[in-house]
Image (cartoon, rainbow, N blue to C red):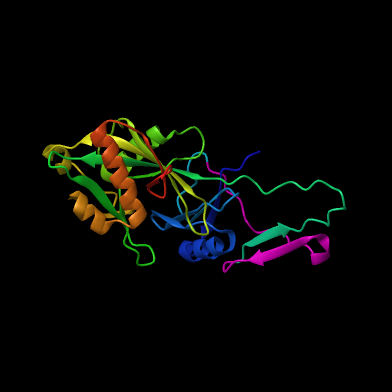
Amino acid sequence: MHLRQIVVDAHDPETLVRFWGSLLGGTPVGRGHGEFHLDPPGSPRFVFRPAGASGARPGRLDFDLTVATADDRGGFRSVRDPEGHEFRIGVAPPVPPGTAVPGPPLPGAVAKARVLFTDGRGRVLLVRLQPWHDACHWGLPGGTVEAGTETPRRAAVREIEEEIGLPCVPGRLLGIDWVHRAHDRPRLVHVFDGGPLADEDLKRVRLDAEELAEWRMCTPREAEALLLPPSWEQLKESLAVLASGTGPAELVDGVPAHS
């Protein structure tokens, strides 16, 4: 059986997601209505939601994280979080000499889908995430590819409709960017051409207020001032591919992989 995610009903979901994120790795992500997600490397997704939330969503598995704490001599160590959930960690016995030891697990990457929208004046659409730990991050609209059968292109359609309320038919792939993350899994970002937006399209933009604080049409120079350097490099290379008709660009942290 392969667990896709673990749902935890918590009195303080934000405190718990920070606690387990510091222990297991991964970056906490707020999903609105007091719910937080955590994707630890090599583990199922953890979903922390307010106690008493209305039922589980389809496809979710709910169970109690509390486990019996074995004696240390039994080969287990136990960590208790602020609300009493316990995480039991097995301790492997010594490996006899000459025994083949399996290597570390292959690194997993989180797939992302971003969409580059432009207008007739050469501007691009950027969105600002709701603050997390007082951070103020701008970027192209889009989000995480859901585990299972969703493809990056389908994720782009879904995320754009959810985030900014516009129908989206992604065009060609402009770039693939391997983005390193400190203390977290790398991101494999797919940047699609969203096509030009007319003034009437812009009037129909409706933000998901739980995730996004604002949106803006920016010139490349304005975008460079708003974006973090790797995100700006990613956008710059994607714009170059869009203008030249070549591509897609192969990037690492926004920089061409062959450079």
Q: Which image quarter: residue 86?
A: bottom right
Q: Position of residue 79 (x, y in %)?
A: 66, 65
Q: Is residue 76 magenta?
A: yes
Residue shown at the point (55%, 53%) measured from the top left: 40
Split into 4 quadrants, where in the image is the N terminus? top right
Residue 206 in view of the camera: no
Residue lying furthest bottom: 82
Answer above or below: position of 14 versus 125: below
**Main SS category, magenta section:** loop
Task: Tell whether 30 sits left or right of 214.
Answer: right
> How many numbered marks are there?
0
Query: Bounds of the magenta span?
Result: 60-83
Q: Is residue 16 magenta?
A: no
Q: Position of residue 27 (x, y in %)?
A: 48, 57
Q: Position of residue 47 (x, y in %)?
A: 51, 52
Residue 35 in view of the camera: yes
Q: Position of residue 160 (x, y in %)?
A: 31, 40
Split into 4 quadrants, where in the image is the C terminus? top left
The answer to which of 91 and 249 lies nearer the viewer is: 249
The answer to which of 42 and 122 lies nearer the viewer is: 122
Task: Tell whether 75 sits left or right of 8.
Answer: right
Residue shown at the point (35%, 64%) measured from the top left: 135
Residue shown at the point (50%, 39%) measured from the top left: 147
The answer to which of 239 and 22 lies nearer the viewer is: 239
Answer above or below: position of 234 versus 153: below
